Image (cartoon, rainbow, N blue to C red):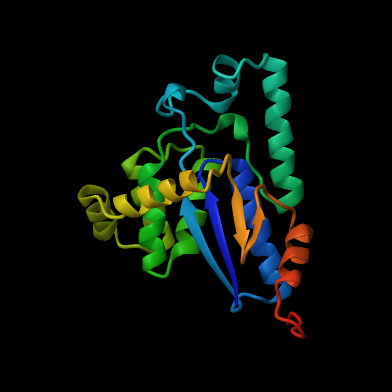
Amino acid sequence: MINIVLWADLQCPFCYVGETNLQHAIEELGLQDQVRLDIKSREIHRPEDGDGDMEMFEIFQQKDGFTPEGARAQIEKINTMGREEAGLHFDFGKVHESNDHDAHRLYKLGRDCNLGPQVRKALHDAYFVNCEKLADPEVLVKAGKAAGLEEDLIRRMLKEGWYENEVANDEMEYDALAIESVPYFIVDQEVIPEHLTKDEFIKVLQNHLPVGQTQN
């Protein structure tokens, strides 16, 4: 069994692309039953960016100091990365970054209901494709239902604070390891502090197969 730990944020395009590339590599090698993936929470939202009241195109200019031309170039670079590396189609300039703490909790609920990948996809679609605010409880309810969770269960989770401690523990572990950015992968004992392409992940996974074992 290959054990992989991933720290990621649900609004980070590099996390989204890296996570997608990893999944594609696992599928191409036929290792779905031989990889144990533990996705941990790391929230990267900056409170000074507001609560989803600005598009990323505006944030790049007003908060990060980009010129309009520079912001467009950076956004296109990110969009191209997603499209060419992972087959993902989104316009990062139109997303609305907001607090996604509850979205991380929703993913953990989905995981415990054996719907983790489905919830993660629904949350990524909500943010990257539909440009919705992950701080909005109704967006989370809609995403959770689309993934197969019961609405009453989602609303109880949001109201009663389920998984608060687990998200906090993920953050403390991140800080204790002195990690500086996401995505951050640990494949068995190998540290990969960045997103990789699918082909790069294939090589990593092949190196971690037991001696004498080949992929399906």
**Can you give x and y, in whole percent of width and height, for residue 19 in the image?**
61, 55
Q: Can residue 142 be seen in this view?
A: no
Number of marks drawn: 0
- Which residue is nearer to you in this view: 40 or 85? 40
Could you tell me residue 44's position as x and y percent? 49, 37
Residue at far bottom of view = 212
**Is 64 on the left or on the right of 206, as rendered?**
left
Left or right: 124 in relation to 107: right
For the N terminus, the image quarter is: bottom right
Question: Toward the viewer: 12 or 43?
Answer: 43
Residue 37, percent across and down?
A: 54, 66
Pick whichever, 180 or 38, lies toward us.
Answer: 180
Residue drawn where x is 41% and y is 47% of the image:
172
Q: Which residue is located at x 61 percent, y 55 percent?
A: 185
Q: Which residue is drawn at the image coordinates 53% and 51% (left, top)?
A: 7
Q: In this view, does 68 lie above or below 5?
A: above
Write down the quadrant of residue 147 in the picture: bottom left
